[in-house]
Amino acid sequence: MQSVDNAVTDVASATKKFFKRVLPIMLVMLVCNQLNRSNIGYAQEHLHADVGIGAAAYGFGAGLFFIAYAIFELPSNVMMEKYGAKVWLARIMISWGIVSFLMVFVQNETMFYALRFLLGAAEAGFFPAVIFYFARWVPAGHRGKATAIFIAGSSVAAALSGPIAGMLLSLHDVLGFRGWQWLFGFEGLLSVVVGIAVFFVLDARIADATWLTAGEKFALTAAIADEDAQHADASGGNPSGKINRWKMLLNPQILLLCGIYFSVQLSIYANTFWLPSIVKQIPGTTDLSVGFLSAIPWVCAVIAMYFAAKWQDKAKSKRPLLVAALLVAAVGTLAAAVASPVLALVFLAIAAMGFKSASPLFWTIPQSGLHPLILAPAIAIINSLGNLGGFVAPFGFGIIKEQTGSVIPGLFALAAASTIAAALVYFLKERQTDTAAGPAATPEEASPFAAAAK
């Protein structure tokens, strides 16, 4: 039997190895995910010229992804619980890579809509599967850091997507393919290759990890099991192990979380899908320069997220930081709506610092109180309903642009949504974290979320 000191040392050592070995794999997966989500933003004008897909059709197709994502998120989550996060993550990557590759052959609006819907169905469950994987491998005291790094990786991926898209679009008529076909084809095949690699390099269970010592495996497994038991005791337990997902959906706190996350996603995906078109309004830009200029807001977001994470570690409550991030997003977006194209890019960079920092700050709140039995399905509900912002934003912007010739009214709406979300944050119940005492939650603190498992 391990001594307490040895167990603590082994848990710390195992966790450090996880961050060095497994988290980079997750970040590579996230880069592929972001590339395949955002590539149509850079291909928009080319799809219009070659295939006849107008602004409204583009916005609707971009948003259809999130309708399918919401529909298939919970079923995907159920299958993930059955087959395990490792198998399901590999399946998700390979299938979304295949669908993305098929975009090379799109010829009309109907094919565009169908493939965007299929892409959402293929990708559904990716984020909850990653969060669930963290929960089975990383002790609670380090889980927030792992999640924050993973979410921060989305900004790095978004920054990379612009230059990569610009270079691929520049391969116009190489080997007889258009630049946008190179974009979809290359990024789709990349996801398939990475998905196959994930199946072989990712371990399903702690016991399977050959890179951990026997002592580290034992200590880490015991630590996770102990945390699960403490959560079960705090919430009164759930002997049957059955989860009422409809009851979870009616939980006021989860509904509130869905609403706030919906607003965050509105800003993220409005910028993901329409930022390149805004940047193209700057005189003298090309596909390549648009790709590099579009990376600026996401680079600024990475820097902001780094400092937000440092402040988050010292804060007992995450709500004031989340409110500040949402208000920064609102102010930056509002200023971008009334500025010149060059200044609009500057203000959108400020807005990105706000809404991208809001995402990891947001996820620390539900994670701190979620019962392990409802961890995956509850996050799936919040993620899927919140992600409907990814449908409303591009579709709404598409209609606005087709009707008015400008996306400025859409920017006003985004600023208003971020302001409303900032106000809603104060209705959230949050576990107060004592940075000196550690992350343990009392039964009363855990109950608003844990009660949904009963």
Image (cartoon, grey):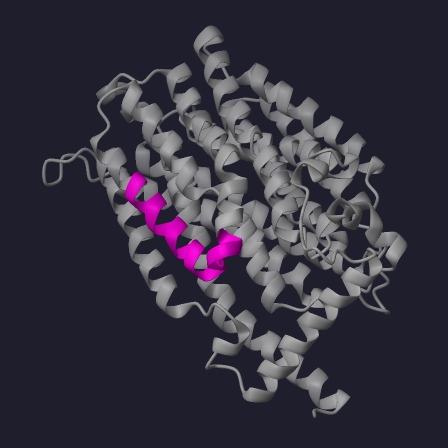
- Magenta stretch: includes residue 193: no
Residue furthest to the front: 240
Question: Main structural element of the magenta stretch: helix, strand or loop?
Answer: helix
* Nearest to the observer: residue 333 or residue 7: 7
Residue at (40%, 26%) from the top-left corner?
280
Quadrant location, the N terminus: bottom right
Side of 377 relative to 72 (left or right) = right
Provide residue 174's location: percent of width, then percent of height: 13, 40
Side of 102 relative to 213 (left or right) = left
Provide residue 221's location: percent of width, then percent of height: 63, 76
- Residue interval drawn in magenta: 80-99
Q: Is residue 90 above or below residue 280?
A: below
Decide if residue 452 is in sight here.
Answer: yes
Provide residue 309's location: percent of width, then percent of height: 69, 56
- Magenta stretch: includes residue 93: yes
Residue furthest to the top: 403
Side of 86 relative to 315 (left or right) = left
Provide residue 76's location: percent of width, then percent of height: 48, 45
Q: Is residue 308 above or below residue 10?
A: above
Residue at (68%, 66%) from the top-left corner?
142
Residue furthest to the left: 175
* Nearest to the observer: residue 211 or residue 247: 247
Q: Is residue 289 above or below residue 144?
A: above
Q: How many labels were placed on the picture?
A: 0
Residue at (84%, 37%) from the top-left corner?
426
